[in-house]
Each structure stands twice: as structure tokens, then as C-alpha cells.
Image (cartoon, rainbow, N blue to C red):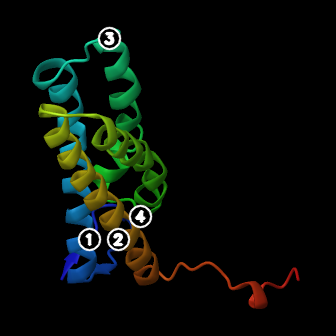
Amino acid sequence: MTTSSSSAAFAVPMAAHTARYLLLGRLGFFGLWLLQPLWILWLAPPQLGNAYVLLALLWLPLWLPFYGIVKGHAYTLAWANFIVMIYFLHSLTNLWVASDMHLYLSVLELLLASMMFIGCTYYARFRGMELGLKIPRLKDDPRR
């Protein structure tokens, strides 16, 4: 068993499957993080518009959860799924209209986005359970 680097005061052991989901989420994230500038600046630059504007629109959102993903913060990995939707939409749109190099890059982007989504979702779920965090069920809510 490994321990999380995010808890400094006390170490809560991390189960092996939780660590695998963290790795899957990180691989997807860093794959997307590397793919965006490579795609936009070198592999298949846009034919219309400014490449740097497109890079800012597609790469800057990945910087928001960067620190939390490196540290393994479950909360950050959970809300990073909102950001990964940008890359699902981008890849699916390109799969619909693109050809040649864009087609292969879109498939790679969809694969990386799926890896990040699955890894982040299940890491946040299982890590929260390990830490004893849970969302109360509606029927258990005392405010009802």
C-alpha cells in the first residue's frame, strides 16, 4: 500500500486500485497537456485564425487543475472532469469534420480525454471513501 502525498498531517493508506485510477487520470491529463501545443503549433496548425489564440483557448484550461493533479487532491481531480469536457467536444467535433492528420489527432485526444475522465472520476470516488468523505443521501439529510 502506498500513502497519499496530499495529506501531510497523517497518512491514510491508498488502496492499489485507487492508485491505478490516479495513474490513469494523470496519464490522460498529461497526455492532453502535451498534445495541445504539439497539435496546434507543429503537427497540424490551424489554417484559419491565429494558432496562439487557439492554443490559449485549448491549453490554458489544463493549467487550472495542474497543481492538484500533481499532488493527487481528490477534490481537484473531481472538478477537473468539467474541464475535460472541452476536449471531448473538441475531439468529437474534429472526428465529425476532419480528415488526414486531424483525424488521428482527434482519436488520440478522445482516448486521452476518456482516460482522464475515467481515472479522475474513480480516483475521486474511491479516495473519498478511503478518507471517510461522503455525500449524504437525500433521505438522510436532516434539513428535509
Residue at point 39% right, 75% down?
A: 127
10 Å crowding of disc 1: few (<14), some (14-19), many (20+): many
Residue type at mark 2 is: Tyr
Task: Choose mark 4 or mark 3, whichever is in front.
Answer: 3
Q: Are marks 2 and 1 in contact (CB under 8 Å)?
A: yes
Residue type at mark 1 is: Tyr
- Residue 138 horizontal/vertical position (percent): 75, 84
Circle 3: element type: loop
Residue at point 14% right, 42% down?
A: 104
Question: Which residue bears the numbered disc 4?
Answer: 74
Question: Which residue bears the numbered disc 1?
Answer: 21
- Which of marks 3 and 1 precedes in the sequence? 1
Question: Which residue bears the numbered disc 3?
Answer: 48
- Which of marks 1 and 4 precedes in the sequence? 1
- Which of marks 3 and 4 precedes in the sequence? 3
Task: Choose mark 1 or mark 3, whichever is in front.
Answer: 3
Q: Residues under labels 2 and 3: Cα distance? A: 39 Å
Residue at point 11% right, 25% down?
A: 43
Q: Residues under labels 2 and 4: Cα distance? A: 7 Å
Circle 2: element type: helix
